[in-house]
Amino acid sequence: MNLLKSMSATLLGLVTLASTGALGSEGDVDYRHYSMEAIGGHMQAIVKILRQEVPHNEHLSLHANAIADMARIAPDLFPEGSQGREALPAIWEQPEDFAEHLDAFHSAAEAFKKAAASGDAATIGSAIGGLGQSCKGCHDSYREE
């Protein structure tokens, strides 16, 4: 009898999940939001370090690596059906252009990761500028402010 109840509960759960397709989409939107917030948090921490507002120069590479890792998954954060929040419809209407922006973000993140590892202030300054521009370029076209 317990097995029958367990199977019924499992089946009911599967039917409920299947009938609420919006849940997956809402989950995707939330996941994207939290992932982008994480990137923003790392960027803010980097700025604090570079402006010498905190004594954590040794953390610079950690933040650079995290952003580079997040840049690798960024294309996965925008699946079809996950429209919402700050993401503008143009993302799905202009997928090739959006993909180019994501590629630019990935390249800039990798360049900043390499610059941070070098420890060279001029290289770091140039690379953070490029990373910031890649973020801005995408946000200007594809993010609701």
Image: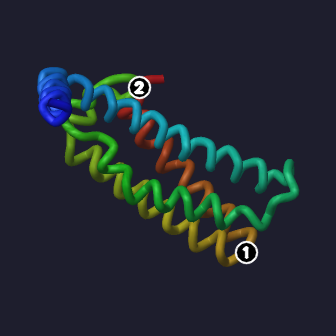
- Crowd around label 1: few <14 · some 14–19 · many ≥20 (10 Å): some
Residue lying at 52% horizontally and 48% vertically, measured from the top left = 133
As rendered, which of 77 and 105 lies closer to the eye? 77
Q: Is residue 23 left or right of residue 86?
A: left
Look at the numbered disc 1 and give the secondary structure of its residue.
loop
Q: What is the total number of numbered labels drawn onto the structure image?
A: 2
**Looking at the image, can residue 93 be seen?**
no
Residue lying at 12% horizontally and 26% vertically, measured from the top left = 15
Q: Which residue is mark 2?
A: 86
Q: Is residue 64 left or right of residue 45?
A: left
Quadrant where the N terminus sits is top left
Q: What separation in Å lies between label 2 and label 1 (alpha carbons)?
A: 35 Å
Q: Find residue 121 and report its horizontal and vertical position in percent.
A: 75, 69
Q: Which residue is mark 1?
A: 119
**Looking at the image, can residue 10 be seen?**
yes
Q: Amino acid at mark 2?
A: Glu
Look at the numbered disc 2 and give the secondary structure of its residue.
loop
The structure's colour scheme is: rainbow
Q: Find residue 40 and report its horizontal and vertical position in percent.
A: 58, 42
Q: Find residue 122 and report its horizontal and vertical position in percent.
A: 71, 69
Question: Which picture quadrant has residue 118?
Answer: bottom right
Q: Earlier in the sequence, mark 2 or mark 1?
A: 2
Q: Find residue 64 and report its horizontal and vertical position in percent.
A: 60, 62
Q: Is residue 14 left or right of residue 119?
A: left
